[in-house]
Image (spheres, rainbow, N blue to C red):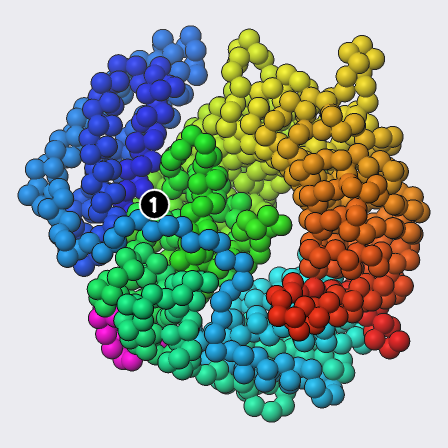
Amino acid sequence: MAEVVVNLLVENLTQLLKENIQLISGLKDDVEKLLEDLGDFKAFLREAGKARYDNEILKRLITKIRTVVNKAEDLIDRYVVAAKFHYDKKWKRYLDIEHPGRKKELAEEIRNVRESMDGIRKDPNYGLNALRDEALPNRGAVQAKVPTVEEEYVVGFDGEVDAIVKRLTEGEGFEVISIVGMPGLGKTTLANKVFKDERVEYHFMNRAWIYVSGVYKRRDVFLRILKELSKLSHTYSDDVTDEDLAKEIKKFLGSAKYFIVMDDVWTGEDWNALKIAFPMNNGSRVLVSTRDKVVAMHANSRGDPHNLKFLTEKESWELLQKKVFREESCPFELKRPGRTIAEKCGGLPLAIVIIAGTLLGKPKTSGAWDKVAESIGDFLKLKLESYDYLIRMSYDQLPYDLKSCFLYFGAFPRGNEIPAGKLIRLWIAEGFIEEEAQSLTLEDIAHEKLSDLVNRNLVMSMQRKSNGQIKTCRVHDMLHEFCKNEAKKENLFEEINTGRQLDTCRRLCVQCNVSEFLSSGLSADHVRSLLCFSSNKYDLPADNISIIREAFPLLRVLHTAPDESIIFTRFPRDMTNLFHLRYIAISTTLTILPQAIDSLWNMQTLIVRTTQSTLNIKGNIWKMTRLRHVQTNSSAQLPPPNTKKDPFANRNLQTLSRISPESCTAIALAKAPNLNNLGIQGNLAKLFETNKDTGSSLFKNLGELKLLEKLKLLNHGGNVQRLPQKYEFPQKIKKLTLSNTHLEWTELSILGSLEYLEVLKLTENAFKGKEWEPSKGGFPCLQFLRIERTDLKSWKASSLHFPLLKSLILRQCLNLEEVPPSLADIDNLQEMELNRTNPRAAQSAWNILQIKQGKEMELKEKGGSPRRFKLNIYPPDELEQIQQI
């Protein structure tokens, strides 16, 4: 991964030359020459990144390059900090007699580094001759991008699914069923296929899927169970014990029938600690997957565990074809080598999936596939439980820039379901994403790379957004282990599980007690990224507030939220001296971000989670030209722009969420013309009301945001009388959230006229009134509708009002008498969720389910491919009442 270090340094130096020439005055020529040298290394390493790791000469050469590049990076980064301090002294800088000497010293150090680089260049092994043909994978022509796959292709599980579904749905009493098998045999895939089976969905309306893994906290598991069952986030104080949470789960479930999957339980002790939350309700089932037969026997309440079988040769070949060719057929000339490859995978699904990812990067010729078959050899037969070799084959096929993105998954705790937005912003801050085309943002490019990793079967897409984009993702435990080990070998990052600090690693992932880690006498100016995932909350004392800046003066990435491993009791003023900081995500008790934050001129992502209802941002964020995303969980008051001092707009800024209504001035929003995501929280009456002097409103300023697609309007304060007119809304709005606005239902006709609106969330009494009948022809593109907390009693709607609706969620609509029966006529409607409504509404939803299932059967009989309709009803007692009728 040495090429990543070079990329970052080249970017830093280029940035200095373009925008901060005053910081390197007198060193411009030296830095430009260094930049030219680094450009040569960058080109070399880009090719080296394509090579396999069996070339020892290449390994040593890359190590040399990494060492000298790191030294150059440290020199420049330290000097920039010193120069920034010097420059900020204004007139006092002329009294700073040390700075000219430091500049002369740096020039000499740069020349020494360039001499070292020249020595590497004169090495007879340097150059493309070091990249021997046999060291290069046979990549062939650039492959076309594989289309995003919505459903996971699985093979060979039909009989096993039927057997488990039968045990789940037949018989009385309470039962725990275990699935046991070696790693990579498909336990999670089978459990997931069972969980999504329509027979199980029909039989158990009350279901939850929980991933446990070897490293877990019982409290977190219980909270996830509550969230999965209720579909609501619960907040509990630290005084609530694990046993109390277990009682909450039992209370919620009552005597109702339920089904819960506990995926990847490692020990009998783990199961004993978790099972206390499950009441032994008649007809209820818990499905436990484990790699340990002893655990499976211990958990299984009656009968034998379900032992997972290996795939047959026929099933192996079928799975390999589906993973490589998707819906297309395998060319005739590839069938012979393909069957050989499938056979040598030994019936292991994970092995087949990994090899399929390798084949995606190969030319579709029999010769190329024969080489893959030969390279597998008898490896799997001799070493069934080791996948490193197979993972290595897929990893070596990755383009150099995808390698760092893939290995970065190992920085997160094992089993974590990672939000794609967080991952992508971290990739960008780490310098893994390079600009490719002016029409694409760095975020667009990063999304493409994430989809590429998913399509190569190296990353699993766990949840998707309504537009099909990946929402959350994770990697298999074995791939996670590979990422961790490879990243450590490549010095990309290091996992810290004790207070121990390594000397050379530039990225640290802290999973131990943060308090112990920070108090271990750190001195780490080589560290560029600090990712804290500790489950122990640590309130950073006021007298230790500067410890992070002192220990990590050249930090680029600081991530401690939303995990809340560190709580800042105040914003460390000297943290604003971390001039290289690009990404910061912190939890705090603050109400003010100081003016000095605008010193963070490299900042790209600023995330602040505070316990306060408001946050006053004093710093001039408008002059932070690299700022891309600002996120808070409270109403942030932004400073007014100074157009004389900062006349230019920030065309990088894409996210402002959440800001106060008063911050939505024309002059402020004009500074962010490319804004894509805007959240506004506060007294929305101030946003909507017309100014008597100007005849306009603050909301009308949003109409100038031509690229705005996501808008949240969260009312905290006075009454809102009306919505703005259609022409006042941003033209391209696709996703809209309203909360606590208490508007009349008739106002929704305005939102129905928004041509591009696809997602509408109405929460916390966004609308009030007993009746709602939408206008015909409205909501032409709406696919997702959520209504939460309302006094709505009668709702009349059909396909005439929501022609493209796919998903409907109703939460805490306690007075609703029925879900409109005519919604059953919407062909696109695929899922419906009712959470805390009432038995009458639940019964009408059940009737819609029966109609939908009848239509599915009719379409199947005619040879069509129906869309399966899913219905979830909470709490369980409503469902029980329906089933008794």
Residue visible at 35% across and 20% down in the picture:
18
Q: Going by the image, does 812 lie left or right of 237?
A: right
Q: Position of residue 388 (x, y in %)?
A: 32, 66
Instruction: Establish if 670 lies above or below 424.
Output: above
Q: Going by the image, does 150 lie left or right of 354?
A: right
The reply to whether residue 686 is in sight is yes
Residue range corresponding to the magenta coloring:
373-386
Q: Quadrant of the C terminus?
A: bottom right
Instruction: Establish if 874 lies above or below 644.
Output: below
Q: Quadrant of residue 171?
A: bottom right
Question: Please, what is the three-letter code of the amino acid marked with disc 1?
Answer: Asp
Q: Position of residue 43 (x, y in %)?
A: 23, 38
Residue 686 lies in the magenta stretch: no
In this view of the protein, which residue sits in the foreground, 753 or 236? 753
Label 1 SS: helix
In this view of the protein, which residue sits in the foreground, 377 or 748? 748
**Which residue is labeled 1 in the image?**
401
Q: Position of residue 509 (x, y in %)?
A: 43, 51
The reply to whether residue 354 is in sight is no
Q: Position of residue 42 (x, y in %)?
A: 24, 37
In this view of the protein, which residue sits in the foreground, 696 or 146? 146
Residue 385 lies in the magenta stretch: yes
Residue visible at 62% across and 50% down in the picture:
466
In this view of the protein, which residue sits in the foreground, 402 or 436? 436
Q: Quadrant of residue 345?
A: bottom left
Q: Quadrant of residue 476?
A: bottom left
Instruction: Establish if 855 lies above or below 269.
Output: above
Residue visible at 92% across and 46% down in the picture:
771
Residue visible at 79% across and 28% down in the picture:
724
Graded by Cα atoms within 10 Å as few (under 14), some (14 to 19) or many (20 or more), the crowding at tag 1 reads: some
